Image (cartoon, rainbow, N blue to C red):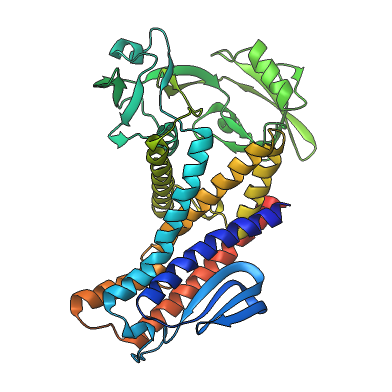
Amino acid sequence: MKIILAIIIFSAIILFHELGHFLLAKKNGITVTEFSLGMGPRLLSTVKGGTRYSLKLFPIGGSCAMLGEDMEDDEPGTFNSASVWGRISVVAAGPVFNFILAFVVAVVIVGLMGYDPAEIRSVQANSSAEAAGLREGDVIKEYQGYHIDLARDLYLYTYLNEIKLDEPVRMTVERDGEKIELSFMPDADVRYLLGFNRKDTETMEVESLIPGMPLGEAGVQPGDVITSINGVRIENGEDYTDYIAENPLSDKPVQITYERNGLEYDAEITPREYKTPTLGFSYNLACVKTSGFNVLKYAGLEVKYLIRSTIMSLKELAVGRLGIKDMSGPVGVVDAIGDTYEESKSEGTLAVWVNMLYMAILLSANLGVMNLLPFPALDGGRLVFLLIEAVRKKPVNRQVEGMIHFAGLMMLMVLMVVVMYHDILSVF
């Protein structure tokens, strides 16, 4: 089922993307030789108005093939015979249509489910936030200079930008129609830690060690399995959680037993103080119903959020805070769609449809942004050359441009193979 759903979602998104190219090509007098959905051999095909419409075997991708698109031919009806601004509109139409599709579907979702305002649900007593004047019911409009439209804007920003104990939190909130600016220092949640990360919540296998913390200094290594604390047998993650709840760690030494290569070792470890910055408030992440023109407003903000989140994720990739393993290709997307479907089934048919539509919005907005990147072979790369032509009043050498796009395409293919490899490892 998840493969069928993925095919339907992918096909709709790609069809709409190529439809943008198709309609603007027709409007600018460019002959479209073939408009196809899918890749490989044709399954169904018909010719109408000089254009072949095809459904192909492999339901991945699609194309809007235009006459003379990759040639220097300027004969009437070819791609290059259109004005430079006409060609710019044709190339840009694909990503723009992805944003239009995302908006249309977002209207449906917002109409059904509403939107998520960043409203304060509770403020911790005696916290810095309370002292600064933050109140329950305030709606966050700006956080650290970052504009907040939806609660997910705040969630995404705080996920990608860690809170620092020595950096003040600056917020603008709306209360009774009035904007109020607040500033306060984060509070510190003090805990005592051994200093390790588990492979998963079910086991006690050490996946990694926190630098400068006692467990690593005692000689414990990734792959070791903690088997007891202070003589109490720890069989799994649940045992560990229960033990820590009943015996909170402090600055007093504890006896750790761990297993490595079938042998058990003992180590006396003194947990170390660890301060975690906290904001001192919680905020809403649930949807609130809306109606009328607000549906259009928040549908637009939904698309804006998805575009912004894609751009911010690309920035994290560029600076190295995210890597290849954090990217997803077709296999990863199919798996995500399948997981979403399975998790939604228990909530009813409406939940399944809404979540599938949201996946369509996410992928459509993502495809729109990715295609506008100024990288060879992508629509954004082609737009760069067309804008240069618009400024210079003459085109870049077509052969040079073709070679650059071909090199870009090869790089994208290599990246796709690497991402797909990581996707398969993650799934299986």
Residue 233, by quadrant, is top right
Q: Is residue 372 above or below residue 196?
A: below
x and y percentages locating residue 145 in the rendered image: 27, 34
Q: Choose between 10 and 353: the one closer to the eye.
A: 353
Q: Is residue 370 left or right of residue 232?
A: left
x and y percentages locating residue 46 in the rendered image: 61, 80
Residue 48, by quadrant, is bottom right
x and y percentages locating residue 57 in the rendered image: 68, 73
View extreme (top): residue:
126
What residue appears at the point 35 percent right and 11 percent down from the top-left corner?
130
Residue 168 visible within the image: no
Q: Is residue 409 left or right of residue 395?
A: right
Residue 348, by quadrant, is top right
What residue appears at the point 53 percent right and 36 percent down from the top-left corner?
112
Q: Is residue 170 left or right of residue 294?
A: left
View extreme (right): residue:
262
x and y percentages locating residue 176 in the rendered image: 29, 17
What residue appears at the point 60 percent right and 42 percent down from the top-left corner?
355
What residue appears at the point 80 percent right and 37 percent down from the top-left corner?
262
View extreme (left): residue:
392
Q: How many marks?
A: 0
Residue 141 visible within the image: yes
Q: Choose between 290 and 390: the one closer to the eye.
A: 290
Q: Choose between 39 and 102: the one closer to the eye.
A: 102
Q: Is residue 158 above or below residue 362?
A: above
Q: Is residue 34 above or below residue 246?
A: below
Q: Choose between 234 and 15: the one closer to the eye.
A: 15
